[in-house]
């Protein structure tokens, strides 16, 4: 893989820059700027190297149809304010657009193509569309790791027609994930939360041979408790998971990996309730498990203390209600404490995990925080990502 930061003489070159600016919008107002802040380094790097930039990105799932509610306009305005450079949003049909139509004014530095998913050819990985995009520039840069698990035209096939490079963020992301999968500093522990064990089974099985501890919490831990014979009351759980869970424990035993799950929990009668702490053998029929309890928090903190590397994906409970956010917050704060003393290498990923870190004000206190969801998990599962393969 070639990296754009290693290239000499970008002066005057036109760069086609694939970014992931799929930020949450409410009434066309951005509600979380995390992904925008992550892409500022590559834009500043290219501007400092006197390149001309054409950004390709998307918002939402318009399914090949134009939608004013999913325009990149508010994102362009947000970035303009951050970098103090005028951005031109190109709404013309890409099939009619030519390279000579762009940067006619020598003062122009940064263009955005309108939402690339307004074209159905994008998600079909259409080869003709990829070639058309490639003709707009001299160099292609993928700095959208979070889109790289998609075989889409602006991520995959485009590299067949134009010199292609990995961007700064993509390089940083891969290097961070390599440190927790292949360049491992042991002992290494993984904390996995979230509601469904079925969506994380590939991740868990791939990490078991490499990790010393895998801590399961959140809704998925309810399946473990049920499997172990404990009552989980009215708590969220999946059906037909016993075989999967049995396989996890057998696989972990073979590879000497410890599987940790809650020994006490915070319950409520509904999602808006106050928290009541119970041992796992005291949960009754109308209880809903919504967080981990203090004994479990203490145990996880001890594991973090004895670890050199930590991977965190998914909250410990229903953190949207502050009464059930204690587990997530305490674990987050413990990792930050170790990180600030340079005693641990920490990687976090996933939208809900980022939301927890934002609430803690700790987004910059981990060694790396991935904004990628699906790509983050698929990479950790050992899957080949089309966007990464295309750059190799």
Image (tube, grey):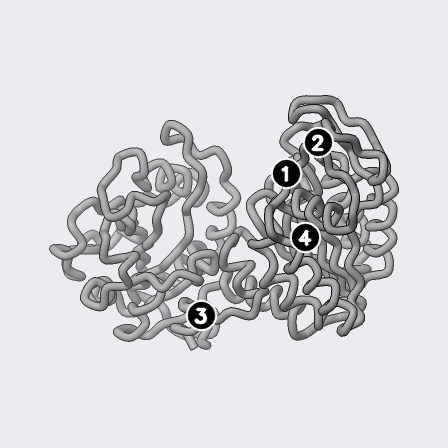
In the rendered structure, the answer to whether residue 267 lies left or right of residue 377 reads right
The alpha-carbon separation of the residues under discs 3 and 1 comes to: 36 Å
The image's mark for residue 288 is: 2
Marks 3/1 in contact by CB < 8 Å: the verdict is no
Q: Which mark is residue 388?
A: 3
Q: Is residue 367 visible?
A: no
Question: Are there few (<14), some (14-19), or many (20+) residues within 10 Å of tag 2?
Answer: many
Q: Earlier along the polypeptide chain: callout 2 or callout 4?
A: 4
Q: Secondary structure at mark 4?
A: strand
Q: Position of residue 231 (x, y in %)?
A: 77, 39
Location of residue 332 (image quadrant) = top right
User: Which element is circle 1 on?
Assistant: loop
Depth check: 67 or 91 in front? 67
Q: Residue furthest top?
A: 273
Q: Position of residue 113 (x, y in %)?
A: 27, 50
Q: Is residue 32 visible?
A: yes
Which is closer to the viewer, label 1 or label 4? 1
The residue at which mark 1 appears reads as 236
Answer with left or right where residue 236 lies relative to residue 74.
right
Instruction: Find the distance from the CA under tag 2 to the CA under tag 3.
Output: 42 Å
Q: Are marks 1 and 2 in contact (CB under 8 Å)?
A: yes
Callout count: 4
Dot 1 or dot 4, earlier in sequence: 4
Q: Is residue 138 left or right of residue 80?
A: left
User: At x 60% / y 51%, what residue is drawn?
Assistant: 240
Q: Which residue is mark 4?
A: 192
User: Which residue lies at the image location 45% right of the left edge and 68% below the top edge?
Assistant: 385
Image marks 2 and 3: residues in contact by CB distance under 8 Å: no
Q: Kindly report which numbered mark, 2 or 3, lies closer to the viewer in this rendering.
A: 2
Where residue 379 appears, x then y in whole percent?
54, 65
């Amino acid at each position: 893989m070639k990296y754009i930061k290693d290239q000499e003489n970008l002066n005057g070159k036109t760069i086609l820059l694939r970014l992931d600016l799929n930020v949450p919008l409410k009434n066309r107002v951005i509600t979380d700027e995390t992904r925008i802040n992550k892409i500022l380094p590559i834009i500043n790097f290219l501007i400092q190297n006197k390149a001309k930039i054409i950004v390709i990105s998307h918002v939402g799932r318009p399914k090949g149809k134009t939608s004013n509610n999913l325009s990149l306009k508010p994102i362009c305005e947000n970035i303009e304010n951050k970098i103090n450079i005028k951005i031109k949003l190109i709404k013309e049909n890409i099939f009619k657009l030519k390279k000579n139509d762009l940067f006619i004014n020598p003062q122009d530095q940064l263009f955005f193509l309108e939402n690339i998913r307004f074209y159905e050819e994008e998600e079909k990985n259409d080869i003709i569309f990829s070639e058309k995009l490639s003709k707009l520039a001299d160099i292609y840069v993928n700095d959208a790791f979070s889109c790289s698990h998609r075989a889409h035209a602006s991520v995959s096939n485009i590299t067949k027609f134009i010199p292609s490079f990995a961007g700064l963020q993509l390089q940083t992301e891969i290097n961070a994930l390599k440190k927790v999968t292949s360049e491992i500093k042991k002992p290494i522990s993984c904390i996995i939360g979230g509601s469904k064990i079925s969506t994380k089974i590939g991740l868990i099985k791939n990490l078991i041979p490499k990790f010393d501890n895998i801590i399961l919490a959140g809704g998925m831990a309810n399946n473990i408790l049920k499997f172990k014979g404990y009552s989980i009351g009215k708590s969220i759980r999946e059906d037909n998971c016993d075989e999967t869970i049995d396989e996890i424990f057998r696989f972990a035993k073979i590879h000497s990996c410890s599987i940790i799950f809650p020994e006490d929990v915070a319950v409520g009668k509904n999602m808006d309730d106050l928290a009541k702490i119970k041992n796992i053998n005291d949960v009754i029929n109308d209880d809903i498990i919504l967080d981990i309890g203090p004994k479990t928090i203490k145990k996880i903190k001890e594991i973090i203390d004895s670890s050199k590397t930590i991977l965190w994906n998914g909250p410990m409970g229903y953190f949207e209600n502050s009464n059930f956010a204690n587990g997530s917050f305490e674990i987050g704060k413990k990792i930050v404490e170790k990180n600030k003393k340079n005693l641990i290498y920490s990687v976090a990923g996933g939208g809900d995990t980022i939301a927890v870190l934002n609430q803690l004000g700790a987004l910059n206190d981990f060694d790396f925080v991935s904004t990628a969801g699906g790509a983050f998990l698929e990479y950790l599962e050992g899957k080949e990502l089309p966007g990464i393969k295309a750059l190799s």
